[in-house]
């Protein structure tokens, strides 16, 4: 920071107190140069740009309520007899973790509310991150220079899943214990090291006496610590890159149009924090979540039907549920494919969306910065890929809830599972093709709108008797907005013969790239946007119908 | 880290969208040359509150009202916290019988927070300036000069350290840095014991009686009716035991009685007693206590991932993700007529693992 | 008259005839019944069985056989006991319209309790089996709710869910919700193991165990059960919670975001 010590001493005593405090801080922290860059920072207005804020605020809410819960929670698996105020568990043996969670729920004033806010906020945090990530994906906001921030966000989503899962496991109730048992089984399926990892994680055999304490430090310290760092980095990058914006009049790749941070966004974003907090508190007042008292303490020989993880793990649960039970035995070893393949798939599906920006930038070969967002229809292949990915994810969720779907829609659970098995493969393909066609259709419509104007719905009868619909030409603002997007040319392989006439070896990666590029931007894969000449030709004649 | 560090004279990045005119702020008239050209920011339109002072006053009152409601809600929160007994239950339509405390605290807190937010946003939307401003972006990439300077500085520093020349230092340093994390990895060794054969054995052994989990009494064959379902644990295990959870996680047993004629698997029949068969209650998929027994089909379903086993046919898998049959415990009757195990399970119970073989 | 005879073979015809017959017998019985019925236990018992047999032959014999020996359409009823009849008929599962479905659902009860008792007495007379429990057995007095909870989680929750909301079984079968099921019927179900439910006879699950379980269910899934946190969301666990968080949680927040980011109404251009 450029905080030279040669600042002129200001006249004291006259300036208001706030100003004096700010001066004091500036002399030590250099806040003025920071403020200069950021105080009037411009943020564009769009509801979808606030999804990230939903995540940030629910994260803050989770930290606040989480700290409160640690004041009462005992991360211990020592068995105690329950003597609290919930009658149906009186005298039952349970771990101290479960006991203290009951204590929070029934004996700490407001404890139940804080627990419920914490849990609801966690579900909303993950849901918010998912939707935020999809917003960024479908508008192409991950393109240069924001690829690293995309990865930060992706990591936050993945870490959020595991933080949520470890938190869900802490009360040591029958439902979460079943989830932990599942985790143990999944770890055991890892070839070669599985049993060791399991023994090390649980301090011996399952369930042992350690996992609550270990999950506790992972849940409240390790993962949230990393996440906090990533959140700060994510926000710094958002400020540094400045926000993206949709195309529109006056909005270019070199500017950002919106309202300044001070005062409008300070009020809107700050106010939104209170709105999010208030809404979640109200939800926690009216809707019960994770009633551990109804589930009872964990015992490895007890279980309940409808044993599901929280929604963000439902996709993994689904993969495990619809996988066939493959198991290979050889040379005294067992390869538990029935569990290990879903475990690998879980990572691969998540990785697919994480690396997508790098694949796209490789295909386009575009090295320039992008600050204007794409409309999803103008990037049909990307949009189709995204929808296919979401389809895989949603099929996983359906698979994870197959038993409840079976009971609530009066279906056979076997039929639901088979449906999911088939659609795990067919679903994304259908989604890809359908989405691409819809995108191209919408592109065509935009093209017609630009060239022929808006359909007014007014029917006019021409003197010679023909009926036509009156088309109203678009304003220049609209014309600009609909034609502002850039369209790539498909990459060609280039000359196969070099300047000396020697045949050049075309690398396989180059061929692949050309093929992909053609699939993205070739004929039939995007509708050429209207050119000025086309527009003039049509409008000058004006005899169009 | 902040943008003022970027020199202003940086070259703008190559623009892909060639027709983008760098016009911001200016309101340009319709362009005859290029009808698709950016007309620039539209002129600012006034809100009702900008032109009508009465409307602005109304907005002000709404904002103040929201903030006041928030204050009242906080006071209500405090009152509720002090006054409402923690175990008070109320009936709220349509929610049902709920905790009065949770409901009151949540709603007052929610209202207090929500009204602050609503007030602030309403203030921003109606009374703060809504003139859209354009701010210039600066390219992220450094200018070629700056880039060259940084590279040169780095080379200079690297040269001064002589890391390139003194290869011995460099290589030993990398070696040391590569090895030192191993200490940390070693320390993690204390997290748990090596697996050994722990996953292969359970508490069951020859002569251990089957104790009914419901009554804590040893079971007799005549107690177990056809079509019934009973859960058992090994004699000598009690809920208060230190290692109860670890042991029951492997030893839990599911006992059903079939008509001997219905048993299709020969080994199953051999290991049964008068049609009474004892199978591990722990699913071979990932270890859920499987026990959704359908007495007419003899199928047993796992509630976690729907693996289905046929108890009349050696508990083989007939559906779902489990990879192998449920292990069966060989049972017989001791001198006093109680059901007893004739040994441990012959294969590891629960989920499969690498060393299972 | 033609119309009437055309409907003779309607599946409900038997029921209609039965009801008419019952109304007639009931009316006649009411008119002629002796005032004091405490005496002559034996005779009233055999009378009940006789009445039950009549009912049985009209409503049950077509599937379960004239002597209760069973057929391809229905299992043998010899030895199932009065408890089984009281449960099956008392919850409306019997008479079933068809045996061709994955599972016979509970429906509107078609017999009165007196008729059910007669039927039960008749079936009980075919072979010894569990009798209908008394209020003493399933009533709440002396029950240990917490022990009942532990037993419920060991024996019942795997199919019927933590608080008895029901769950899926294989191939379209299901464990029904226990909400609102009479304690007597729950007791009978445990005793007799209706359809695919295994039985939990007194030899492996004592009378006291059953009493405890019923008391626990009443505590956690009764009409007066408190859900301190608010809406129970079906008591189904994370799936319904996740749906709620998406639809009402994130949905509400997005609606708020739309408001926050929306343009404020502009003054009309003059």
Image (tube, grey):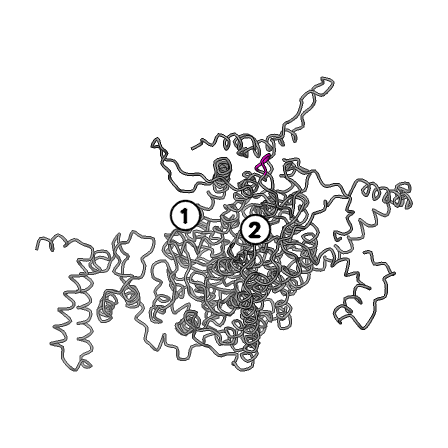
Residue sitting at x 48%, y 79%: B88
Question: Mark 2 vs mark 1: same chain?
Answer: no
Crowd tier of the residue under label 1, counting other residues whose Cα lies within 10 Å: few below 14, some 14–19, many 20 or above: some
Q: Is residue A383 left or right of residue B292?
A: right
In this view, the residue farthest toward the top is A501
Please check the rendered image and state whether residue C8 is part of the magenta-colored stretch, yes or no: no
Q: CA gap, disc 2 to disc 1?
A: 26 Å
In this view, the residue farthest toward the front is C270
SS category of the residue bearing label 2: loop
Q: Nearest the camera: B234 or A544?
A: A544
Residue bearing mark 2? B352
Crowd tier of the residue under label 2, counting other residues whose Cα lies within 10 Å: few below 14, some 14–19, many 20 or above: many
Q: Nearest the camera: A228 or C37?
A: A228
Q: Is residue A255 above or below residue B283?
A: above
Magenta stretch, overall SS: loop
Q: Is residue B295 left or right of residue A63?
A: left
Q: Quadrant of residue C47?
A: bottom left
Q: Position of residue A338 (x, y in %)?
A: 54, 47
Q: Quadrant of residue B112?
A: bottom right
In which chain is the residue bearing label 2? B
Is residue B39 visible to the viewer in this orientation of the structure? yes
Could you tell me which quadrant the C terminus of chain A lies in? top left
Q: Position of residue A163 (x, y in %)?
A: 62, 59
In the picture, the disc for residue A397 is: none
Q: Which residues are magenta?
A: B31-35
SS category of the residue bearing label 1: helix
Q: Position of residue B33 (x, y in %)?
A: 60, 34
In which chain is the residue bearing label 1? A
Could you tell me which quadrant the N terminus of chain A lies in? bottom right
Is residue C206 visible to the viewer in this orientation of the structure? no
Please check the rendered image and state whether residue B34 is part of the magenta-colored stretch, yes or no: yes
Residue bearing mark 1? A415
């Amino acid at each position: 920071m450029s905080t030279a010590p040669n600042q002129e001493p200001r006249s004291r005593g006259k300036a208001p107190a706030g100003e004096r405090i700010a001066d004091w801080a500036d002399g030590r922290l250099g806040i003025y140069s920071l403020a200069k860059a950021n105080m009037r920072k411009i943020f564009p207005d769009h509801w979808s740009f606030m999804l990230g804020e939903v995540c940030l605020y629910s994260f803050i809410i989770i930290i606040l309520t989480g700290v409160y819960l640690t004041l009462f929670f005992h991360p211990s698996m020592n068995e105690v007899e329950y003597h609290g105020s919930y009658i149906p568990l009186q005298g039952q043996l349970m771990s101290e973790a479960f006991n203290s969670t009951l204590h929070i729920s029934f004996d700490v004033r407001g404890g139940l509310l804080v627990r419920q806010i914490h849990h609801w906020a966690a579900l909303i945090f993950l849901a918010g991150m998912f939707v935020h990530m999809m917003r960024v994906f479908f508008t192409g906001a991950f393109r240069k220079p924001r690829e690293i921030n995309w990865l930060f966000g992706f990591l936050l989503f993945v870490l959020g899943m595991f933080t949520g899962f470890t938190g869900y496991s802490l009360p040591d109730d029958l439902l979460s214990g079943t989830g932990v048992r599942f985790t143990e089984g999944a770890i055991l399926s890892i070839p070669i090291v599985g049993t060791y990892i399991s023994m090390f994680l649980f301090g011996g055999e399952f369930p042992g006496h350690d996992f609550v304490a270990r999950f506790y430090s992972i849940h409240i310290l390790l993962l949230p610590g990393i996440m906090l760092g990533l959140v700060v980095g994510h926000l710094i990058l958002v400020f540094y890159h400045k926000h993206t914006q949709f195309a529109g009049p006056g909005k270019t790749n070199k500017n950002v149009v919106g309202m300044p941070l001070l005062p409008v966004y300070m009020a809107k974003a700050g106010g939104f924090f209170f709105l999010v907090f208030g809404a979640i508190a109200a939800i926690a007042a009216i809707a019960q979540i994770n009633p551990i008292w109804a589930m009872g303490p964990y015992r490895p020989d007890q279980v309940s039907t409808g044993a599901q993880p929280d929604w963000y793990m439902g996709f993994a649960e689904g993969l495990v549920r619809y996988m066939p039970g493959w198991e290979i035995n050889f040379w005294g070893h067992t390869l538990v494919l029935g569990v290990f393949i879903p475990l690998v798939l879980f990572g691969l599906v998540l990785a697919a969306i994480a690396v997508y920006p790098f694949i796209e930038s490789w295909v386009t070969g575009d090295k320039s910065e992008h600050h204007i967002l794409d409309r999803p229809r103008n990037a049909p292949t990307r949009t189709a890929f995204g929808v296919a990915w979401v389809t895989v994810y949603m099929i996983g969720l359906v698979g994870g809830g197959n038993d409840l779907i079976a009971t609530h829609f009066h279906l056979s659970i076997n039929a639901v599972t088979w449906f999911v098995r088939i659609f795990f493969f067919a679903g994304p393909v259908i989604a890809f093709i359908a989405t691409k066609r819809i995108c191209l259709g919408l592109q065509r419509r935009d093209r017609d709108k630009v060239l022929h104007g808006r359909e007014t719905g007014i029917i006019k009868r021409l003197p010679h008797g023909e009926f036509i619909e009156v088309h109203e030409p678009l304003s220049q603002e609209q014309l600009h907005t609909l034609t502002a997007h850039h369209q790539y040319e498909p990459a060609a392989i280039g000359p196969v013969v070099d300047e000396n006439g020697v045949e050049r070896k075309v690398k396989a990666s180059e061929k692949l790239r050309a093929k992909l590029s053609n699939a993205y931007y070739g004929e039939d894969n995007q509708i050429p946007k209207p050119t000025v000449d086309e527009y003039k030709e049509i409008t000058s004649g004006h005899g169009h119908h | 880290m902040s943008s003022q560090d970027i020199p202003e004279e940086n070259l703008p990045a190559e623009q892909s969208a060639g027709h983008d005119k760098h016009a911001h702020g200016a309101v340009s008239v319709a362009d005859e040359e290029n009808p698709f050209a950016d007309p620039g920011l539209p002129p600012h339109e006034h809100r009702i509150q900008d032109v009508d002072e009465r409307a602005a006053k109304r907005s002000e009152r709404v904002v103040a009202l929201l903030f006041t409601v928030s204050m009242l809600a906080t006071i209500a929160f405090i009152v509720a916290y002090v006054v409402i007994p923690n175990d008070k239950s109320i009936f709220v339509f349509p929610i049902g019988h709920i905790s009065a405390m949770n409901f009151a605290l949540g709603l007052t807190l929610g209202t207090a927070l929500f009204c602050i937010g609503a007030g602030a946003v309403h203030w921003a939307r109606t009374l703060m300036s809504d003139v859209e401003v354009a701010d210039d972006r600066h390219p992220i990439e450094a200018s070629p000069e700056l880039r060259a300077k940084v590279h040169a500085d780095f080379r200079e520093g690297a040269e001064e350290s002589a890391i390139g020349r003194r290869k011995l230092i460099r290589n030993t340093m990398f070696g040391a840095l590569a090895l030192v994390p191993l200490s940390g990895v070693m320390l993690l060794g204390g997290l748990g014991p090596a697996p050994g054969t722990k996953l292969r054995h359970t508490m069951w052994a020859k002569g251990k009686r089957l104790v009914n989990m419901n009554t804590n009494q040893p079971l007799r064959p005549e107690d177990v009716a056809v079509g019934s379902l009973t859960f058992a644990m090994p004699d000598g295990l009690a809920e208060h035991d230190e290692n109860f959870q670890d042991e029951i996680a492997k030893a839990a047993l599911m006992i059903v009685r079939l008509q001997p004629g219905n048993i299709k698997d020969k080994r199953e029949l051999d290991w049964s007693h008068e049609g009474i068969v004892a199978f591990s209650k722990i699913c071979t998929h990932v270890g859920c206590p499987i026990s959704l027994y359908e007495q007419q089909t003899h199928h047993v379903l796992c509630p976690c991932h729907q693996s289905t086993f046929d108890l009349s046919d050696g508990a083989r898998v007939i559906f779902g993700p489990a990879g192998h049959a449920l292990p069966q415990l060989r049972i017989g009757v001791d001198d006093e007529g109680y059901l007893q195990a004739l040994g441990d399970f012959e294969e590891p119970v629960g989920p499969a693992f690498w060393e299972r073989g | 008259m033609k119309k009437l005879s055309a409907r003779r073979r309607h599946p409900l015809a038997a029921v209609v005839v039965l009801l008419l017959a019952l109304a007639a017998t009931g009316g006649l019985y009411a008119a002629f019944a002796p005032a004091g019925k405490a005496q002559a236990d034996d005779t009233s018992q055999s009378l009940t069985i006789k009445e039950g047999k009549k009912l049985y032959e009209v409503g049950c014999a077509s599937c379960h056989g004239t002597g209760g020996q069973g057929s391809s359409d229905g299992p043998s009823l010899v030895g199932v006991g009065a408890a089984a009849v009281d449960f099956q008929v008392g919850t409306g599962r019997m008479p079933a319209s068809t045996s061709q479905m994955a599972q016979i659902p509970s429906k509107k009860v078609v017999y009165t309790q007196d008729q059910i008792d007669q039927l039960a007495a008749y079936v009980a007379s075919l072979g010894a089996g569990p009798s209908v429990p008394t209020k003493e057995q399933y009533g709440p007095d002396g029950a240990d709710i917490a022990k009942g909870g532990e037993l419920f989680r060991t024996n019942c929750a795997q199919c019927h869910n933590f608080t008895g909301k029901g769950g899926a079984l294989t191939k379209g079968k299901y464990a029904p919700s226990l909400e609102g099921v009479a304690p007597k019927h729950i007791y009978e179900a445990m005793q007799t193991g209706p359809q695919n439910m295994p039985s939990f006879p007194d030899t492996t699950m004592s009378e006291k165990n059953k009493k405890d379980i019923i008391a626990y269910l009443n505590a956690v899934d009764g009409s007066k059960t408190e859900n301190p946190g608010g809406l129970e969301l079906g008591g189904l666990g994370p799936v319904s919670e996740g749906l709620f968080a998406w639809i009402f949680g994130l949905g509400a927040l997005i609606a708020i975001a739309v408001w926050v980011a929306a343009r404020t109404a502009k003054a009309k251009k003059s």
